[in-house]
Image (tube, helix red, strand yellow):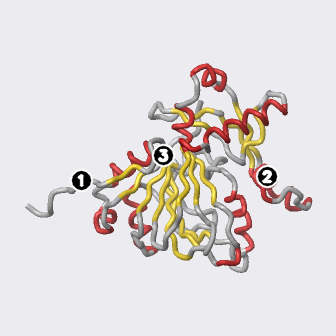
Amino acid sequence: MNGTAKSPLETKEIKPKVGSVILADKEALLSGVHAAEIADLMERRGVLIFPKVNFTDEEQLRFTRTLGNIAKENSGEEIFPITLDFGRSEGIKYLLGSFYWHFDGFSQPMPVRASILCAKILSPTGGNTEFANCYAAYDELPEDEKAKLEGLRVEHSAWNTLLYYHPEPNQAELEAYMSVGEVELPLVWTHRSGRKSLVIGCSASHVVGMERKQSALLLNRLREWATSEPFHYSHTWSVGDMVMWDNTGTLHRATAYDPACGRELHRTKLEGEEPITA
């Protein structure tokens, strides 16, 4: 009989409501032997930390493929450097939006299933990545509030995100972002698993049909709730760390750092598997 018995996947919870550390070795991760367990744990815990696994780009791609199909960037890459070195590309200015709570691919028919980051170069100060478990945040809402949220729909757009980090764009910039369009999404996503999560973040403009002031208060309160301590985790990076998270039920953002420091993380993504439905 070839091979050896599968070893249990060793994990450790970070907080009761969010985050787990994965302690598997590189060989096991690349083999895919724990892929199903990792995918299930990610959906339950929101974010998974692989301390100092030190994947090369090729290894990161191999690991990502054990979990599903790779979602390519708009420019066609399977792996993408996350950096604020604008000398490398003018097109990455949208990454300034990463300092605000968001999820990726909100305008896609099926948003990115998961994102995976490997740390290559870090900032001397700041530059943590924060996460908020929007499954757990929804679960902990009072039942009467859940009932009030059911059926509400929210308009999301790239240009709403733009106004967070560039509140006074020139007309050409605003028109370019507006050309991407808007999408109307349910405030509460009922996943195919039956679980529900809040669909919020800096792309959310307003609740459709609600008075402007009340809409702003509701979206702000839900964002504040979802990113509060029980559901929040801030990862302090070490070079070689890998972090992956459930993009369909987790918000994320970077904390402030000096853009000139050369901080660089490499990203792969998993293709979406389900649309956002009420």
- The answer to whether mark 1 and mark 3 are in CB contact below 8 A is no
Q: Quadrant of residue 133?
A: top right
Question: How far from the left and from the top, in percent, is residue 220?
Answer: 73, 39
From the image, state whether disc 1 or disc 2 is nearer to you: 1
Q: Residues within 10 Å of mark 2 (few under 14, many from 20)?
A: many
* 89 is higher (above) or lower (below) than 146: below
**Mark 3 Cα shell of 10 Å, populated few (<14), some (14-19), many (≥20):** many
**Residue 182 or 99: which is nearer the viewer?**
99
| Mark in front: 1 vs 3 | 3
Residue at 48 percent across and 41 percent down: it is: 17
* x and y, in percent, of residue 75 in the image: 63, 67
Q: Quadrant of residue 94?
A: bottom right
Q: Quadrant of the N terminus?
A: bottom left
**Disc 2 target residue:** 159
Which residue is rendered at x = 84% and y = 28% of the image? 211
Task: Tell me: 168 left or right of 210.
Answer: right
Figure check: 71 above or below 276: below
Residue 249 in view here = no
Query: What residue is shown with label 1?
Result: 8
> Measured from the top left, where is residue 72 in percent x and y?
55, 62
In the depicted view, which residue is nearer to us: 261 or 40? 261
Q: Position of residue 182 (x, y in %)?
A: 75, 44
For numbered disc 3, what is the local secondary structure?
loop
- Sequence-wise, the earlier of marks 1 and 3 is 1
Q: Amino acid at mark 2?
A: Trp
